[in-house]
Amino acid sequence: MALPPPDPQFVLRGTSAAIHTLHFSCGGQEPDPPVLFSGSENGLIHVWNLKTHRVDTALDGHGRKSVYCVETMGGKDRLLSQGRDQRICLWDLAEGRTSVTDSVCTEHVGFCRCSLVQLAQGRWLMATAAKGLQEVQVLELPSKTSVCTLKPEVGAKLGMPMCLKLWQLSCGSQPLLLAGYEDGSVVLWNVTMGKALSQLICHQEPVMSLDFDSERTKGISGSSEKVLCIWSLNEQQNLQVYKTHELVNAGISDITIRPDKKILATAGWDHRIRIFGWKKLKPLAVLDYHTATVHCVSFSEHRNPRERLLAAGSKDQRISLWSLYTQS
Amino acid sequence: MAVFDTPQAAFGALRPACVQLTRAQTVENVRQLQAHLAAVSGAALQELQEYVLFPLRFALRVPGPKQERLVQSLVQCISSVLAATCVRKRELLQELFSELCTCLAPPPSSGKPAPLSEELKLAVIQALHTLMHSAYGDVVLSLYQPSTLPLLGFAVSLLLGLAEQEKAKQIKISALECLQVLVLQCDCQEHRHLDEEEAQQCGDLFASFLPGISITLSRVITGDIKQGHKTTVSAIRLFYLIVGWVMSDAQLARIPKSKEKLPVEQSRVSELMVHRGPEWSKSTAQKLSLLLHKVVESSSVHPHWKVRLELVELVHHLLSNCSQSLVDSFSHLLKALVGLVNDENSEVQSRCNEVLRGIAEQRIVVQNRALADVLSENLHSLATALPRLMNSQDDTGKVSTLSLLLGYLKLLGPKINIVLNSVSHLQRLSKALVQVLELDVTDVKIVEERRWGPPGSWQQGVQRGRHQKKYFRFFTEEKVFQLLQQVCRVLGYYGNLYLLVDHFMGLYSESGLYRKQAAMVLNELVMGAAGLGVDVLQEREVPPSVDDLKGSITSILDEYTDQANWYLITSIDTEEGSPEHSVQRSGLTARPGGPCSTVLLPSLEPQVTTRSMNSNIWQICIQLEGVGCFAAVLGKEFRLLLLSALYPVLEKAGDRTLLISEMALGTLADICEACSYDSVQCLINENSDYLVNGISLNLRQLAHQSHASQVLDTMLRHSDASLLPLVEDIIQDVLSALDQSYNNQASTFLRVLHSVMTALVQWFGMCSTEEHQQRQTDKGQSRTQSQGQHEVTMTRQEVERFFLDYVSQKQIAEGDVPDTGEEEADEVPPLAKAEPNHCDTDGEAPLPIHAQLARDVMERCIHLLSDGSLRVRLKVLDVLELCVTVLHPHGNHLLPMAHRVWPALVTRLISDDPLAVLRAFKVLCTLAQTCGDFLRQRFSKDVLPKLTSSLLSQAPASARAGPVYSHTLAFKLQLAVLQGLGSLCERLDMGESDLNKVADACLIYLSAKQPVKLQEAARSVFLHLMQVDPDSTWLLLNEVCCPGPCEPPHASLRPVTLGGMGRPRNELTDNVLLLLQRLQQQESTGPGASTREASPP
């Protein structure tokens, strides 16, 4: 019999609103403590100091509308956040500043998180759902110049984009976008050419979340059903279903593959976090702590493997931190 | 007397006396000369020195036996001449020296000193002393030539003989002082300083006397104590001066390899001369080592402190002059020195410290490898013997042994690491420490003493927590413990912290036997490493960085608070223990232990003995103490560690074992101080997020639920309303944990719920209840006012109106509400609202968090009200009451809950243990404050009949009962019911028939036969009834007893006859009359005053 699943290492409380997104930034030099950003329903972004486990600052930039995506651009001083006020804000947090330096108006009404990829030093590409119902807009940051707008063919009823993942095969190669749509399909887009390369219908319900491993060219997606779907991308850039995995309870709100590509975590509507081996999708653990839907899971990239963490944010207003590395 | 300043005048004056003395050598003549000498000035006498000395010396030289008195006076006279003049001629000096020595010379036949009188000996010694002082400049050196060696040797042996064998202290001391002058080491400053060359030559000469002098002196030093301390002191001083001279490192270094040839004519003398070559110095050092050992041994325990002080000087002198030549003796010398650090005399102590500090500062030890070796060797042998010594010695012996150990460590200073790096040394030392520090764990009291109730004042606990005395197996003296503490701290100060911490952590986990001691040592090590409370001789070169300290502390802390070391069995409480212990045990065994885990875990032992529990208690205490130490070491930096440390400490603050909880309080206070929080309150308040985390995680494990609830309990008691969001968060956890385990953990959780609700009442309840009461009284006032008005004037119309009012009020009282907009009309009929769980659907403002909590808690109470255990039921009733109080201002939410609670509550009121009935009744009273209308019907239907009947049935019993009755439960129940019933009736606005029931039941309690308290309570019922319905009460009372006839207010009305009229005085009369009087007052003075008086006591 395996060991019983562990307890969280720590539980961060005090946001007094449901947590929608989490993002670690642990790359700082020694005196800088590792940091966790959390975006919550009341429109605040909390910056958690992971040494003291307390909120260092709370950023308020989305007019008290739910924040559902937070990303860092480079270090922890440059922050991008997306909120239900239909804006994407760029923050400058260096030297204790808390100011919004720039913002992009997306006019998108859904919950689709934007996706970032670094093209070169200081140049970023961002994909976000746009005003048009089925459209995805790709912008370059920080210049905010529009690269292209990805529209499905006329007549294709994909529905709204639900989740996005920008990636490059290798640094410098042309960026590709994986998008999950409301009708349950995942589409691979060539961003520079603005055209769909492949489409795979892998779910009956909207795709809630997906993540992609560019080394193995395999991805995983979850929807509101009881199924996790793993698909692979062949040389002809065609998506095909590789494997599906049946779950006990329906509903996956977030999927994240750990940066070392060994395991992945899912955030379930059944209040549970599930850990799988990425290679064979072997179920490893069910982390049961939250008392409401888990909205997001995130892995830290701390240099010291022993200090790496998994964070999960939930509707129950708590963020649980789990130490998964020390277990092995 | 005239003074003769010029030599001529002096000559004139002295001549006759000198001539006279030359002619006849009598005492009288000598005295005359001496009298004349007194009148001569020093300068004049210098001119005449030889002239005056001549007759005196002549008299001494006259062959044949002489009178002792004459010799004595001659010598004294010479000495007075010499005192005033100085000797400028070498020959004169030598001659005088030899002549004086001859006076003491024994008859040639016997080897012993001449059997002379003591006065004479003293005179001669003093004369010699004076002679040496009067020698002018270089002249004195003429005595210290190889050629004069025999003469010098003669004098030395004479004086030594006197010093050793004389009985008189004065002579002994003078002889020793004279010897000191003779070896050119006089204490006075008049002497010329010798240059190196001269000193070297004298050293060569003195080397010949060294054996004799040192042996004799060592005999004097170790001689009878009765000789007085001054003799010993002088002897020690002489000893070290001469040894220090002859064996001086500087001089020995300059000695040529081979003996230099002296001129032939001195060949006989040269045989006497010693060549201080390496061989000689080595063998001499060996012999001296033996002597020194003897000297040190006897004088280090000499009862007089001056002797011990002189010994310190000896060590100092020899250490600073002969650190190479006498290296073999240093183990003794240092031992003596180090041992005297803790001398009982403060002067010795301070001098000793000074010397030690000097040694340390000059880096004698650090630079001298040989010395360090000697020290570490000493240390090793001491450490080896330490456990045995600690076993066998008494406390004073232990003190000196440990002082020695401490001294060695201090002297070694930074060199300690050499010792520590040797595994055998470290092991010896640590084993010794660990064995010595073994605690005495036989005291049963420690296990027995429990903490009852909530911790009262922090201050008190803190005070006691900081001064917990430990009892050790091998010693009782506090001083011994302090020394051990210092030993550990010095180790930590100089030693390699990582190495030490590692080693003792190893011991800590190696065996349960060592664990407590190892923890104690670890605590002190860390203190020492931070330089706290450590007394050292020299600064270390590199103090450890904060990060190093933090690293070590974190690892120790982790080990301390590990489940296996933190959750130990400390009691065999059955009260709440059984589930707790079994899970504790399982929790422990489930943890994968090391190879020796079976030894480690006391829980695996078949039975828990008092001894093992005591030991566990102490282990926890020591670990708690450690946390305090670490906080002190890290200061504000410790705040970061609070994340992991605060929860466990707080857990122990709520421990049932008195010692542990006090110790934990002390630790909390230490942490506060270290992290600069103003108070424990602040500490807990500002770190409640950490605590909440710990509580929440621990609640998830059955084994730790009770600890978690204890912490929560403590936390709540020290936090305020600002923490409500956190508290709310955690209470949800508690409730869900409770939902999962109603059976076994109910009582644990109820305690938490109780403290939560108490906190909520404290934070939010106060104002609202007051408000509410205010409202209640307002209501009462307006009513009585309206009723009171028409008593004033009695017209027919008013009588008529009174009756109309009466009818309408009666209708209202029976629940028949008229539609016209009266105030009662907007109170919604209760049944319409009584459906549960529809509170939020009405679209009202959302309930504040605290009220939501109260509602959630109340819901759990419903389930638990019918729990099997009386204890649980009682607790639930308490919690319930608090819930009701909190929910007061939110009637719309309270009512549905009350509806659900009611059936269970009624059962408690009607058929339960009297204790439960009592509490339930209290709850009912509280509930009545808000839910009057809701409760009215139910109360009169479900509860009142039962209450009145029990009151009626109990009345005869209480009327008969004796004084002991007031201590019974039945009495308390009666009292509570009577006390509550009045206000209950008033609050519930009961109907007439119910009021009559109440009045009937209470009437018998007005009897004088009832216990006074019950009478009072019964009176209070009636006072309340007067508020509700003064008229019927008046009637009722008058039916029992009527004070006077009633005059009808109008002639058209018939006179009234009341049942109580003209009755004889009976048991009820007194109380009834009293009540009627109050009623009268109330009617005349207005309602305000009387309502206040009538309020229940």
Image (tube, grey):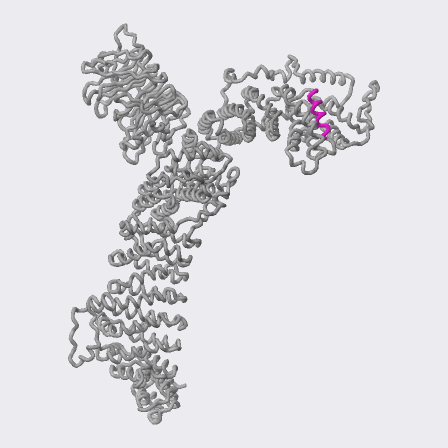
Residue A45 occupies quadrant: top left
Q: Which of these two is toward me, B606 or B1025?
A: B606
Q: Which residue is pictured at 33% across the width and 13% down the height? A: A206
Q: Which of these two is toward me, B614 or A172?
A: B614
Residue A195 occupies quadrant: top left
Q: Which of these two is toward me, A309 or B1089?
A: A309
Q: Eyeballing the image, is A250 above or below B127?
A: above
Is B533 situated left or right of A201 in this image?
right
The mark total stands at: 0
Quadrant, the N terminus of chain B:
bottom left
Q: Eyeballing the image, is B414 above or below B146?
A: above
Reply yes or no: does residue B1095 show up in magenta: no
Is B273 situated left or right of A90 in this image?
left
Taking the image as drawn, is residue B1089 in sight? no
Query: Percent from the top left, x then y, of residue B215?
Result: 30, 72
Taking the image as drawn, is residue B79 in sight? yes
| Magenta-tinted stretch | B992-1005
Residue B990 occupies quadrant: top right
In the rendered image, the residue lying farthest to the top is A155
Query: Percent from the top left, x then y, of residue B706?
Result: 46, 33
Q: Which of these two is toward me, A95 or B256?
A: B256
Query: Percent from the top left, x then y, of residue B844?
Result: 51, 17
Quadrant, the C terminus of chain B:
top right
Is A146 situated left or right of B126 in this image?
left
Query: Percent from the top left, x then y, of residue B525?
Result: 35, 47
Q: Eyeballing the image, is B396 above or below B241?
A: above
Reply yes or no: does residue B993 show up in magenta: yes
Report the magenta stretch's main SS.
helix
In the rendered image, the residue lying farthest to the front is B606
